[in-house]
Image (tube, rainbow, N blue to C red):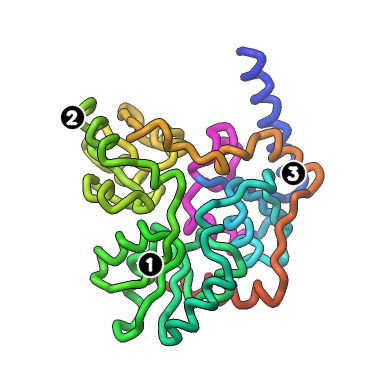
Amino acid sequence: MSIIEERMSQLTEEVKKLKKERNAIILAHVYQRPEVQEVADIIGDSLELSRRAAATDADVIVFCGVHFMAESAAILSPDKVVLLPEENAGCPMADMVTAEQLRAKKQEMPDAVVVAYVNTSAEVKAESDICCTSANAVKIVQSIPEDRPIIFIPDKNLGAYVASKTGRPMTLWEGWCNTHDWVTVEEVLKAKEAHPQALVLIHPECRPEVVALADYVSSTTGLIKYARESEAKEFIIGTESGILHQLYKQCPGKEFYLATRRLVCPNMKATTLGKVKEALITMQPRITVPPQIREKALACLEKMLAVK
Protein backbone atom coordinates (compact mmCIF):
# COMPACT_ATOMS: atom_id res chain seq x y z
CA MET A 1 0.00 0.00 0.00
CA SER A 2 1.39 3.40 -1.02
CA ILE A 3 1.61 6.35 1.38
CA ILE A 4 -1.36 7.98 -0.39
CA GLU A 5 -3.47 4.81 -0.19
CA GLU A 6 -2.56 4.41 3.48
CA ARG A 7 -3.58 8.00 4.19
CA MET A 8 -6.88 7.55 2.33
CA SER A 9 -7.61 4.39 4.29
CA GLN A 10 -6.90 6.21 7.56
CA LEU A 11 -9.08 9.16 6.56
CA THR A 12 -11.91 6.82 5.59
CA GLU A 13 -11.86 5.18 9.02
CA GLU A 14 -11.71 8.56 10.77
CA VAL A 15 -14.72 9.82 8.80
CA LYS A 16 -16.71 6.68 9.58
CA LYS A 17 -15.92 7.06 13.29
CA LEU A 18 -16.91 10.74 13.33
CA LYS A 19 -20.07 9.98 11.38
CA LYS A 20 -21.16 7.51 14.03
CA GLU A 21 -20.33 9.91 16.88
CA ARG A 22 -22.32 12.73 15.29
CA ASN A 23 -25.26 10.53 14.24
CA ALA A 24 -24.62 11.84 10.76
CA ILE A 25 -25.59 10.63 7.33
CA ILE A 26 -23.35 11.31 4.32
CA LEU A 27 -25.06 11.94 0.99
CA ALA A 28 -22.88 12.00 -2.11
CA HIS A 29 -23.74 12.84 -5.70
CA VAL A 30 -22.41 10.39 -8.29
CA TYR A 31 -20.14 13.13 -9.66
CA GLN A 32 -18.11 13.19 -6.44
CA ARG A 33 -14.58 11.79 -6.12
CA PRO A 34 -14.49 7.97 -5.77
CA GLU A 35 -13.12 8.08 -2.22
CA VAL A 36 -15.91 10.44 -1.17
CA GLN A 37 -18.52 8.16 -2.72
CA GLU A 38 -17.03 5.26 -0.77
CA VAL A 39 -17.74 6.85 2.65
CA ALA A 40 -21.27 7.87 1.69
CA ASP A 41 -24.38 6.21 3.08
CA ILE A 42 -26.36 7.15 -0.01
CA ILE A 43 -25.08 7.84 -3.52
CA GLY A 44 -27.44 9.16 -6.16
CA ASP A 45 -28.69 11.99 -8.33
CA SER A 46 -30.45 15.12 -7.12
CA LEU A 47 -33.91 13.53 -6.93
CA GLU A 48 -32.84 10.49 -4.94
CA LEU A 49 -30.71 12.55 -2.58
CA SER A 50 -33.52 15.07 -2.04
CA ARG A 51 -35.92 12.29 -1.13
CA ARG A 52 -33.48 10.62 1.24
CA ALA A 53 -32.59 13.93 2.89
CA ALA A 54 -36.27 14.47 3.64
CA ALA A 55 -36.65 10.98 5.14
CA THR A 56 -33.52 10.63 7.26
CA ASP A 57 -33.63 10.37 11.05
CA ALA A 58 -29.98 11.40 11.41
CA ASP A 59 -29.13 14.56 13.36
CA VAL A 60 -26.58 15.73 10.80
CA ILE A 61 -26.63 15.65 7.00
CA VAL A 62 -23.24 15.93 5.31
CA PHE A 63 -23.97 16.78 1.69
CA CYS A 64 -21.11 15.99 -0.67
CA GLY A 65 -22.27 17.91 -3.69
CA VAL A 66 -22.76 21.58 -4.51
CA HIS A 67 -24.47 24.45 -2.72
CA PHE A 68 -27.98 24.18 -4.16
CA MET A 69 -28.12 20.50 -3.12
CA ALA A 70 -27.25 21.29 0.50
CA GLU A 71 -29.79 24.11 0.41
CA SER A 72 -32.47 21.67 -0.75
CA ALA A 73 -31.60 19.38 2.17
CA ALA A 74 -31.86 22.32 4.57
CA ILE A 75 -35.25 23.26 3.10
CA LEU A 76 -36.58 19.71 3.45
CA SER A 77 -35.00 19.05 6.86
CA PRO A 78 -34.95 22.34 8.84
CA ASP A 79 -34.44 20.50 12.14
CA LYS A 80 -31.21 18.88 10.91
CA VAL A 81 -27.71 20.30 10.80
CA VAL A 82 -26.79 20.39 7.10
CA LEU A 83 -23.09 20.57 6.28
CA LEU A 84 -21.47 21.29 2.91
CA PRO A 85 -17.80 20.23 3.28
CA GLU A 86 -16.65 22.65 0.56
CA GLU A 87 -18.46 25.94 1.08
CA ASN A 88 -17.41 27.31 -2.31
CA ALA A 89 -18.74 24.34 -4.31
CA GLY A 90 -21.29 26.20 -6.39
CA CYS A 91 -23.11 25.66 -9.67
CA PRO A 92 -22.57 28.15 -12.52
CA MET A 93 -25.89 27.16 -14.09
CA ALA A 94 -27.76 27.88 -10.84
CA ASP A 95 -26.18 31.34 -10.87
CA MET A 96 -27.61 32.04 -14.35
CA VAL A 97 -31.03 32.89 -12.90
CA THR A 98 -31.72 35.18 -9.96
CA ALA A 99 -34.95 35.71 -8.03
CA GLU A 100 -35.09 39.30 -9.30
CA GLN A 101 -34.76 38.22 -12.93
CA LEU A 102 -37.41 35.55 -12.47
CA ARG A 103 -39.86 38.00 -10.87
CA ALA A 104 -39.46 40.26 -13.90
CA LYS A 105 -40.16 37.36 -16.26
CA LYS A 106 -43.24 36.37 -14.27
CA GLN A 107 -44.62 39.90 -14.69
CA GLU A 108 -44.28 39.46 -18.45
CA MET A 109 -46.08 36.08 -18.28
CA PRO A 110 -48.42 36.25 -15.26
CA ASP A 111 -50.36 33.09 -16.22
CA ALA A 112 -47.26 30.92 -16.62
CA VAL A 113 -46.28 28.01 -14.39
CA VAL A 114 -42.61 28.26 -13.42
CA VAL A 115 -40.83 24.90 -13.49
CA ALA A 116 -37.49 25.23 -11.73
CA TYR A 117 -34.76 22.69 -12.26
CA VAL A 118 -33.47 21.71 -8.84
CA ASN A 119 -30.16 23.29 -9.92
CA THR A 120 -31.33 26.68 -8.62
CA SER A 121 -30.92 28.71 -5.45
CA ALA A 122 -33.44 28.63 -2.60
CA GLU A 123 -34.48 32.20 -3.48
CA VAL A 124 -35.30 31.14 -7.04
CA LYS A 125 -37.20 28.06 -5.85
CA ALA A 126 -39.22 30.37 -3.60
CA GLU A 127 -40.32 32.28 -6.71
CA SER A 128 -41.15 29.09 -8.65
CA ASP A 129 -44.25 26.87 -8.74
CA ILE A 130 -42.72 23.40 -8.91
CA CYS A 131 -39.24 21.88 -9.03
CA CYS A 132 -37.91 19.10 -11.22
CA THR A 133 -34.75 17.09 -11.70
CA SER A 134 -33.39 15.50 -14.85
CA ALA A 135 -34.90 12.22 -13.61
CA ASN A 136 -38.49 13.49 -13.38
CA ALA A 137 -38.64 16.64 -15.54
CA VAL A 138 -40.82 14.99 -18.20
CA LYS A 139 -43.34 13.77 -15.59
CA ILE A 140 -43.41 17.17 -13.90
CA VAL A 141 -44.19 18.99 -17.15
CA GLN A 142 -46.82 16.38 -18.04
CA SER A 143 -48.52 17.07 -14.69
CA ILE A 144 -49.15 20.72 -15.59
CA PRO A 145 -52.53 21.55 -17.20
CA GLU A 146 -52.15 21.88 -20.96
CA ASP A 147 -53.78 25.30 -21.05
CA ARG A 148 -51.07 26.81 -18.84
CA PRO A 149 -47.94 28.33 -20.41
CA ILE A 150 -44.65 27.16 -18.88
CA ILE A 151 -41.44 28.98 -18.02
CA PHE A 152 -38.64 26.42 -17.66
CA ILE A 153 -35.56 27.56 -15.73
CA PRO A 154 -32.59 27.68 -15.96
CA ASP A 155 -31.32 24.92 -18.30
CA LYS A 156 -32.30 25.46 -21.92
CA ASN A 157 -30.83 22.09 -22.94
CA LEU A 158 -32.85 20.07 -20.44
CA GLY A 159 -35.86 22.22 -21.30
CA ALA A 160 -35.47 21.48 -25.00
CA TYR A 161 -35.26 17.75 -24.26
CA VAL A 162 -38.40 17.86 -22.10
CA ALA A 163 -40.26 19.86 -24.77
CA SER A 164 -39.33 17.23 -27.36
CA LYS A 165 -40.64 14.44 -25.14
CA THR A 166 -43.86 16.12 -24.02
CA GLY A 167 -44.77 18.18 -27.06
CA ARG A 168 -45.31 21.12 -24.72
CA PRO A 169 -44.13 24.52 -25.94
CA MET A 170 -42.16 26.22 -23.17
CA THR A 171 -40.33 29.48 -22.63
CA LEU A 172 -36.77 28.35 -21.96
CA TRP A 173 -34.35 30.32 -19.82
CA GLU A 174 -30.97 31.03 -21.38
CA GLY A 175 -28.94 28.88 -18.98
CA TRP A 176 -26.77 25.81 -19.36
CA CYS A 177 -24.42 23.45 -17.52
CA ASN A 178 -20.84 24.46 -18.19
CA THR A 179 -19.68 20.84 -18.10
CA HIS A 180 -22.37 19.14 -20.21
CA ASP A 181 -22.62 21.98 -22.71
CA TRP A 182 -18.96 21.40 -23.63
CA VAL A 183 -19.75 18.08 -25.32
CA THR A 184 -19.82 18.45 -29.10
CA VAL A 185 -21.24 16.33 -31.92
CA GLU A 186 -17.72 15.95 -33.30
CA GLU A 187 -16.47 14.47 -30.02
CA VAL A 188 -19.30 11.95 -29.80
CA LEU A 189 -18.83 10.91 -33.45
CA LYS A 190 -15.08 10.52 -32.86
CA ALA A 191 -15.80 8.34 -29.81
CA LYS A 192 -18.23 6.24 -31.84
CA GLU A 193 -15.61 5.78 -34.54
CA ALA A 194 -13.09 4.63 -31.92
CA HIS A 195 -15.62 2.30 -30.24
CA PRO A 196 -18.12 1.19 -32.92
CA GLN A 197 -19.79 -1.44 -30.69
CA ALA A 198 -20.46 1.00 -27.84
CA LEU A 199 -23.90 2.40 -27.04
CA VAL A 200 -24.06 6.16 -26.44
CA LEU A 201 -25.55 7.23 -23.09
CA ILE A 202 -26.19 10.97 -22.75
CA HIS A 203 -27.38 13.28 -19.99
CA PRO A 204 -30.17 15.66 -21.09
CA GLU A 205 -28.14 18.69 -19.96
CA CYS A 206 -26.11 18.19 -23.14
CA ARG A 207 -26.94 20.17 -26.28
CA PRO A 208 -29.93 18.95 -28.35
CA GLU A 209 -27.72 17.96 -31.28
CA VAL A 210 -25.62 15.80 -28.94
CA VAL A 211 -28.71 14.28 -27.29
CA ALA A 212 -29.91 13.35 -30.80
CA LEU A 213 -26.92 11.00 -31.15
CA ALA A 214 -27.76 9.03 -28.01
CA ASP A 215 -28.97 5.46 -27.79
CA TYR A 216 -30.34 6.34 -24.36
CA VAL A 217 -30.93 9.63 -22.52
CA SER A 218 -31.48 9.87 -18.78
CA SER A 219 -30.36 11.24 -15.42
CA THR A 220 -27.19 9.90 -13.84
CA THR A 221 -28.88 7.09 -11.92
CA GLY A 222 -30.97 6.32 -14.99
CA LEU A 223 -27.83 5.92 -17.08
CA ILE A 224 -26.28 3.62 -14.47
CA LYS A 225 -29.41 1.46 -14.35
CA TYR A 226 -29.53 1.22 -18.14
CA ALA A 227 -25.87 0.20 -18.38
CA ARG A 228 -26.31 -2.36 -15.61
CA GLU A 229 -29.33 -4.01 -17.25
CA SER A 230 -28.20 -3.74 -20.87
CA GLU A 231 -26.73 -6.72 -22.70
CA ALA A 232 -24.22 -4.38 -24.33
CA LYS A 233 -20.64 -4.50 -23.08
CA GLU A 234 -19.34 -1.08 -24.15
CA PHE A 235 -20.72 2.41 -23.59
CA ILE A 236 -19.78 5.97 -24.49
CA ILE A 237 -20.72 8.24 -21.58
CA GLY A 238 -21.93 11.81 -22.04
CA THR A 239 -22.01 13.05 -18.46
CA GLU A 240 -19.59 14.08 -15.71
CA SER A 241 -16.65 11.73 -15.14
CA GLY A 242 -17.52 10.93 -11.52
CA ILE A 243 -20.21 8.55 -12.76
CA LEU A 244 -17.50 6.14 -13.96
CA HIS A 245 -16.83 4.97 -10.39
CA GLN A 246 -20.38 3.68 -9.98
CA LEU A 247 -20.55 2.35 -13.54
CA TYR A 248 -17.47 0.17 -13.10
CA LYS A 249 -18.60 -0.84 -9.61
CA GLN A 250 -22.12 -1.84 -10.64
CA CYS A 251 -21.37 -3.17 -14.12
CA PRO A 252 -18.48 -5.66 -13.86
CA GLY A 253 -17.07 -6.85 -17.14
CA LYS A 254 -18.24 -3.79 -19.07
CA GLU A 255 -16.22 -0.92 -20.54
CA PHE A 256 -16.99 2.79 -20.43
CA TYR A 257 -15.50 5.65 -22.44
CA LEU A 258 -16.08 9.35 -21.77
CA ALA A 259 -17.35 11.25 -24.81
CA THR A 260 -14.70 13.85 -23.98
CA ARG A 261 -12.05 14.20 -21.30
CA ARG A 262 -13.44 17.65 -20.57
CA LEU A 263 -16.41 16.12 -18.73
CA VAL A 264 -15.09 17.16 -15.32
CA CYS A 265 -16.98 19.53 -13.02
CA PRO A 266 -14.47 21.43 -10.82
CA ASN A 267 -17.19 22.22 -8.29
CA MET A 268 -18.14 18.57 -7.85
CA LYS A 269 -14.48 17.66 -7.47
CA ALA A 270 -13.86 20.38 -4.83
CA THR A 271 -15.04 18.14 -1.97
CA THR A 272 -12.27 15.95 -0.55
CA LEU A 273 -12.22 13.29 2.15
CA GLY A 274 -10.18 15.65 4.32
CA LYS A 275 -12.88 18.33 4.03
CA VAL A 276 -15.57 15.80 4.95
CA LYS A 277 -13.60 14.94 8.08
CA GLU A 278 -13.08 18.61 8.96
CA ALA A 279 -16.79 19.35 8.51
CA LEU A 280 -17.69 16.57 10.94
CA ILE A 281 -15.19 17.86 13.49
CA THR A 282 -16.11 21.55 13.33
CA MET A 283 -19.77 21.13 12.26
CA GLN A 284 -19.05 23.77 9.60
CA PRO A 285 -19.72 25.04 6.97
CA ARG A 286 -23.40 24.83 7.91
CA ILE A 287 -26.04 25.63 5.30
CA THR A 288 -29.24 27.33 6.43
CA VAL A 289 -32.16 28.95 4.61
CA PRO A 290 -34.07 31.96 6.03
CA PRO A 291 -37.57 30.89 7.21
CA GLN A 292 -39.49 33.18 4.85
CA ILE A 293 -37.58 31.81 1.83
CA ARG A 294 -37.63 28.23 3.10
CA GLU A 295 -41.41 28.13 3.43
CA LYS A 296 -42.00 29.11 -0.20
CA ALA A 297 -39.15 26.95 -1.54
CA LEU A 298 -40.44 23.98 0.46
CA ALA A 299 -43.82 24.17 -1.29
CA CYS A 300 -41.99 24.09 -4.64
CA LEU A 301 -39.97 21.00 -3.66
CA GLU A 302 -42.91 19.21 -2.03
CA LYS A 303 -44.97 19.58 -5.19
CA MET A 304 -42.15 17.87 -7.09
CA LEU A 305 -41.87 15.05 -4.56
CA ALA A 306 -45.65 14.48 -4.74
CA VAL A 307 -45.48 13.67 -8.47
CA LYS A 308 -44.95 9.92 -8.84
Residue 214 in the image: state x and y as whole percent: 24, 46
Q: Is residue 67 left or right of residue 172?
A: right
Q: Are marks 1 and 2 in contact (CB under 8 Å)?
A: no
* Mark 3 neighbour density, 10 Å: few (under 14) some (14–19) many (20 or more): many
Disc with the residue nearer the chain's start (1 vs 2): 1
Residue type marked 3:
Ala
Residue that carries the numbered disc 2 in the rendered image: 196
Residue that carries the numbered disc 1 in the rendered image: 172
Residue type marked 1:
Leu
Residue 6 in the image: state x and y as whole percent: 66, 19
Which of discs 2 and 3 lies nearer the camera? The answer is 2
- Say above or below: 179 vs 306: above
Find residue 273 and report its image quarter: top right
User: Real-space Cα distance between discs 1 and 2?
Assistant: 35 Å
Which of discs 1 and 2 lies nearer the camera? The answer is 1
Where, quadrant-wise, is the N terminus in this rendering?
A: top right
Which contiguous range is marked in magenta? 30-56
Find residue 122 and report its image quarter: bottom right
Q: Is residue 114 left or right of residue 254?
A: right
* Mark 2 neighbour density, 10 Å: few (under 14) some (14–19) many (20 or more): few
Q: Which residue is depicted at the point 55% across and 39% down?
A: 266
Residue 287 is one of the magenta-drawn residues: no
Under circle 3, the secondary element is helix
Asked whether 9 or 195 is in front, the reply is 195
Under circle 2, the secondary element is loop
Asked whether 229 or 74 is in front, the reply is 74
Q: Which residue is depicted at the point 26% across and 41% down?
A: 185
Residue that carries the numbered disc 3 in the rendered image: 279
Q: Which residue is depicted at the point 67% across and 44% down?
A: 86
Residue 135 in the image: state x and y as whole percent: 39, 58
Residue 51 is one of the magenta-drawn residues: yes
Let me know if residue 264 appears in the view. Answer: yes
